[in-house]
Image: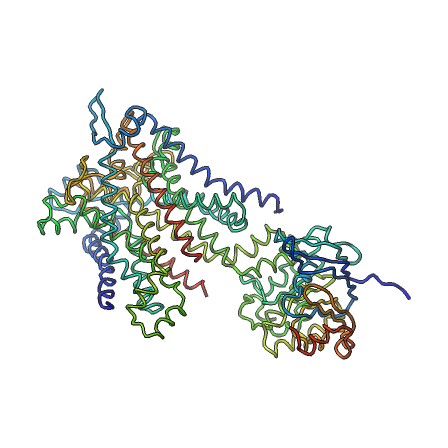
Amino acid sequence: MLWTICIFATLTAVPLFAILGEVLLRGYNQLSWSFFTEPTPTAYKAMKAIEAGERIPGGIANGIVGTMIILSMAVVVAVPLGILCGTFLAENSKKRFAKVVSYLTDLVQGIPSVIIGIITYIWVVVPMRGYSAIAGSVALCIMMLPLIIRSTEETLKILPVSLKEAGLALGGNKARVMLKVQLPAAFGGIFTGVLLAISRVIGETAPLMFTALGCSFIRWSITKPISAVPLLIWEFFNDPNLQELVWGASLFLLIFVLSLNLLAKYLAKKWNQ
Amino acid sequence: MESVTPILEFKKTCVSYTKQTMAVKYVSAAIERNTITAIMGPSGCGKSTLLRAVNLMHSLYPNIRVDGEILLNGENILSMEPIEVRRRVGMVFQRPAPFPTMSIYDNVLAGFALNGIHLSKSKKDEIVESNLRNVALWNEVKDVLNKKGTFLSGGQQQRLCVARALAMNPDIMLMDEPTSALDPIATKRIEELLLELQKKVTILVVTHNMGQAKRISSRSMFMYLGELIEYGDTETMFSNPEHERTKAYLIGKIG
Amino acid sequence: MNDKLYRIILFVAALTIPIVCGGVVYALITDAYDAFEHFGFFRFLTSSEWSYTEGAEQYGALPFITGTLLTTLLALLFCIPFSMPVAFFVGEYFKGSRIASVLSTVTDLLAGIPSVIYGLWGFYTLRPIIIALDISSQGSGILTASLVLAIMIVPYAASLSAEFIKMVPNDLKESAYSLGATRAEVVRKIIFPVAGSGIFSSYILAIGRALGETMTVTMLIGNTNNIPTSITSTGNSMASIIANQFGEADGLRLSSLIAIGLILFLITAVINMIGKMMIKRARIS
C-alpha cells in the first residue's frame, strides 16, 4: 500500500518536469536580447525567414509591454480595493452584510475566466466602443480581487487580539489602530497574497481575448487594443508561420510565473516565524 | 479631616455578558492615590472583567453591558467617550504586546502616534529616555532603540509595555496579571518596578498570585463569583481576614 | 482619520463585490435573453444545432454542455488515482517531513502553470503519443483534453484533501494503533471516515475548477460542434465554443454564446457553493 502511494505520488511530479523540460528545450535558443526587445514579426516576414531556413526575426516585446501595462493598472486598483474590502470583512465578521460579501467573494473567485472576459466585454468594451488595455485590466482586476481580499482577511484574523487591544488601550481609534498596528503586522500575509494573485492572472489568456484583443506592435496607449504575453502565445499557436516563437514566449512566461510562486512561498515561510 | 477625591471609585458597578449572567455584581470601592491595589480571587471571579471595565475595553464587544458608575477623579467614565477615557488610563496586559513592526523607540511613543499627536524630535527623545529610565530599561536598550522590540526577553518586553503606557501620563495604571507569563526573575524586577512607580502613578493590579499581592500591594480587594467580598489593607486582610470566604481562599480551601 | 470616515471607506470598498456580482448576473441575463426568447429555454438547452446560415440560424447548447460535463467527469476520474496518494503522502505517511514539503511545493507549482502552456504541451507532446498509440487518429478530443485537465486539477484536490487528512486528531490515531491496528487499517477506518467529507468537498471544488477551464480544453478538444459519441471523439465545451467564436459573433449567435456563458456560470456557481459549504462544515466538525 505504501509503495503504491509513493509511486503514484511521485508520478504526479512528472508532468511538472516534463512540461518545464519541454518548454526549456524547445524555447531556450529563441531567447535573446532581440527576442525581448522587438515586437512580433508580420506573417510575411516570418514566412520568408522559414523559407530561407533562418531564425524568425522579432520577439515578444509588444506582449511584455502590454502585460506590464495591463497588470500595473489592475494591481493599482485591485490591491487597495482588496485590502480595504478584506479589512472590512475582518472587522465586521459577525454582521450579516459582511457574511453576504464573503459568500459573494467566493462566488466571484469561482467564475470561469472566459465568463469574466464576456462580462468585461459587455461592461467596458461595448460602452468604450473598442478593445483596450483598460478593458483587459478591468478583467484581471476582477480576477485578482477575491484572492487579495481573502489573504487580507485571513491574515488580519490570525493576528493576536492583544495587539489590537493594546493599541486601543493607548487611546487609538479603530482607524489608527488598524493603520498603524494591525495592517503593518499583517503586511507579510497580504504581500504574499498579492504576489500569488499576480502570478495567477499574469498567465491568463481567456479574459484578455475579448478585452485587450492583442496588437502586433508595441503600444503605450491604454485606450486601444494591446498585446499581452499569453495572448501572443495563443496567436503564435494559431498562426502556422509563427509557431516557432511559441516556445520562447512560453519559456519566458513559465519561468516568470513559477519564480513568482516560489518567491511567494519562500516569503510566506520566512515571515511566518 | 480633609476629604480627597479618590482617584478611582466603583459605585455599584455591574458587568454582564448576557441578560441572565452577571460577571461582576454591585462592586463598590474607592481606590486611593499613589497606592498599589491588588484585586485577587479564584478564576472566574470577575477581577479581569472589572479591571477591563475601567478603560472601557468592553465597548469592543457589543453584548457586554456595564451598569452603575465608575468615577475617575469624580467623573463617570461610563458616560465618556472611550478614547477620552483611555488617554487617561493606562493598561498593561498579561502577554507582553510590543507592536512587532515598530522599533523600541517608536513603541514607547506609540500612544502619541495612535492619538494623532505630533511631537518634535527633541520632545520625542525626551519622552523615550525618561520613560525607559522609569522602567529601568534605558541602560539595556539605549544603543538599540531602532531595533524592533520583539527580540527582547519577556520581562524586558513587558517593561517596554509599561513604559509605553506611562508615556501617556495616565491618571491610573491598570495591570492585568502582568507577570503571569514571565519567569520568577523577570517577575521580581517588575514587582520592584511597580513599587517604585506607585510614587508617581496609582496602580491597580489583577493577580492570581497571592504572594505577589502580599509583596507589592498596600490595599487588596478579594472577589468571589463576581462579588467584592472584602476590601482593605493588605496586611490586615492577610493576617486577619474578616470574611470566611477570604479566609478560605487565603488558606487554599477555594481557588 | 476618524472612525466614521474609516467605516464609510471600508463599507464602500466592500460594496465592490456585490456590485461586480450584480453586474455579472445582470449582463449575462439581459444579453442571453434574446437567444432564450428566440429558441425557447428548454429547446436551447437540448438542441444540438449550430448553424449560422443567414435567416435560418439555429443554435443549441447541448453538445457543449455534454462536452463540458464529459471532460470534467473524465478529468475527475483520471485525477483521483494521483491526487489521493499525494494527499495521503503529504498529510499522513510523510507528514511534516522535508520530502512532503517538496512534493507539496511541486504540486503547488503545477497549479501555477498557465493553462495556455498546458494546452501547448498537450498539443505538441501528448497528442503525438496518443496518435502513436493508435488510440485516435487526430489525437485531439475528449480524452486528450480530459487527461491534461486531470493534471491541472490534481493540485487543488490534493492540497485541500491533505489539509483535512492532517486535521485528524492524533489521539484518535494513537488509540487505534494502541489497539493493534496497522497503518493501512488506521487510514481506512479512522482517517477516511473522519476526513472523508472534507476530502469529498475538495473534489467538488476541483470539479468547479475543471468546469470553467478554457484554454487547455480549447486547444485539445478538437473543436467540432457535435455531441461526443466516444471518449476519442472531438467536440467542444461551453468554455471552448465561447473562446472560439465570441470574437466574430454578433446578433443571435452572440446572444447564444452569452446564453451558454450564463449556463456555465450557473453550473460553476452551484458546484462551487456546494463545495465551499461542505468545506466549511467539514472544517468546523
Give the vertical position of A104 relative to B244 (above or below): above
Point 42% across, 38% down: residue: C21
User: Is residue B126 visible to the viewer in this orientation of the structure?
Assistant: no
Residue sitting nearer the eye, B160 or B205: B205
Point 56% across, 67% down: residue: B149
Point 75% across, 68% down: residue: B200
Picture quadrant where residue C109 is located: bottom left
The image position of residue A160, as x and y in percent, is: 54, 61
Residue sitting nearer the eye, C55 or A50: C55
Q: How many tags in the picture?
A: 0
Picture quadrant where residue B2 is located: bottom right
The image position of residue C18, as x and y in percent, is: 46, 39
Point 24% across, 66% down: residue: A6
Residue sitting nearer the eye, C122 or C26: C26
Which quarter of the image is occupied by the N terminus of chain A? Answer: bottom left
Residue B80 placement, left or right of A150: right
Give the vertical position of B225 relative to C220 (above or below): below
Residue B149 placement, left or right of C115: right
Give the vertical position of A102 relative to A132 (above or below): below
Residue B46 placement, left or right of A121: right
Give the vertical position of A23 relative to B165 (above or below): above
User: Is residue B61 visible to the viewer in this orientation of the structure?
Assistant: yes
The image position of residue B117, as x and y in percent, is: 66, 54
Residue A128 placement, left or right of B139: left
